[in-house]
Amino acid sequence: MSQLSVFTQSVWRRWMKWVPVRILSVKHRPRISAHLKSLGPQDRYLRFGYPATNEQIENYVNKLNFARDDIYGVFNRRLEIVAMAHLAFSVDPEWATCAEFGVSVDLQMRGKGLGARLFDRALVHARNQGVGLLFIHALSENTAMLKIARKSGAKVVRDGSESDAYLSLPVADMDSQVNEFIEEGMADVDFQIKVRAKQFLQVLRTLQEVRTGVRESRHKSGV
């Protein structure tokens, strides 16, 4: 097998495993709210540190600052958010180069590496924004999140029922900046394809309903 064939197969395997992560904006608030409200009591507890009610989730979503922070989402084919992450930048001048990461994944989408994918995406952006220290605060029982942190090389400090993870980030370089640029472009293309596909399916359903109605009408009229 030629080196070109080996390279092509390697790129293809990476492409097939690639999960598009899109930056969310104000217009996505309803979808963010729907995703978080779909979480069960235990998942809400792990994400927020307390069993958040729908009202508390709504309050959290309404206070999201899209101008300051970055919110990321993974969409399914129905354009529903099945996983999301919040990269919150410090508002304290003394900690200006620090950011905090939080993530949530739908129960049926667990085990697909979406949490780690969102973490990697947020890490690259934080690095490109000059963040030197990425911080994660999680309940000690949130083993999935702490596993992601440890795998990235973060230092995890446990204090009873809560744990803090600290990850020092290297200075941004051309590779990290180009990677993020490509990531954003590919994620936007993927989202637009899903939008077009959903619109096309809706048109097909409408046509099918019309055809069914015509056939039933002809049957009733004996034509």
Image (cartoon, rainbow, N blue to C red):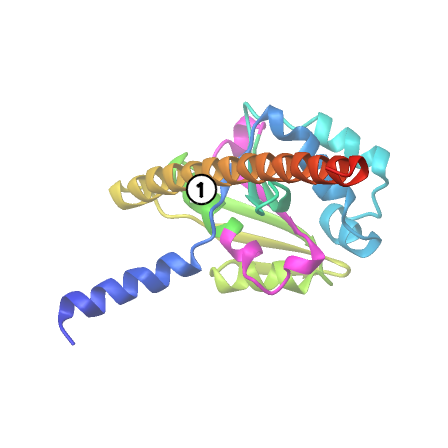
Tell me if I can see residue 87 in this picture.
Answer: no
Q: x, y (%) of residue 43? A: 76, 54
The span shown in magenta is 91-117
At 83% from the left and 43% from the top, the residue drawn is 52
Q: Is residue 125 visible?
A: yes
Q: In the figure, residue 90 lies in which quadrant? A: top right
Q: Residue furthest bottom?
A: 1
Q: Quadrant of residue 59?
A: top right
Q: Amino acid at mark 1?
A: Asp
Quadrant of the rendered structure where residue 175 is?
top left
Query: Foreground residue, 77 or 18?
Result: 77
- Circle 1 packing at 10 Å, graded few (<14), some (14-19), many (20+), is some
Residue 16 drawn at (x, y percent): 40, 59
Residue 60 belongs to magenta span: no
Q: Nearer the viewer, residue 21 or 43?
A: 21
72 vs 127, nearest the viewer? 72
Is 107 one of the magenta-colored residues? yes
At a point 76% along the width and 49% down the height, the residue shown is 39
- For the residue labelled by badge 1, is the local secondary structure a helix, a strand or a loop? helix
Q: Position of residue 161 (x, y in %)?
A: 77, 59
Position of residue 54 measured from the top left corner of the image (x, y, whole percent):
84, 38
Identity of the residue drawn at 49% across and 35% down: 196
84 sits left or right of 126 in the view: right
In this view, the residue farthest toward the left is: 2
Q: Which residue is mark 1?
A: 190
Q: Quadrant of the C terminus?
A: top right
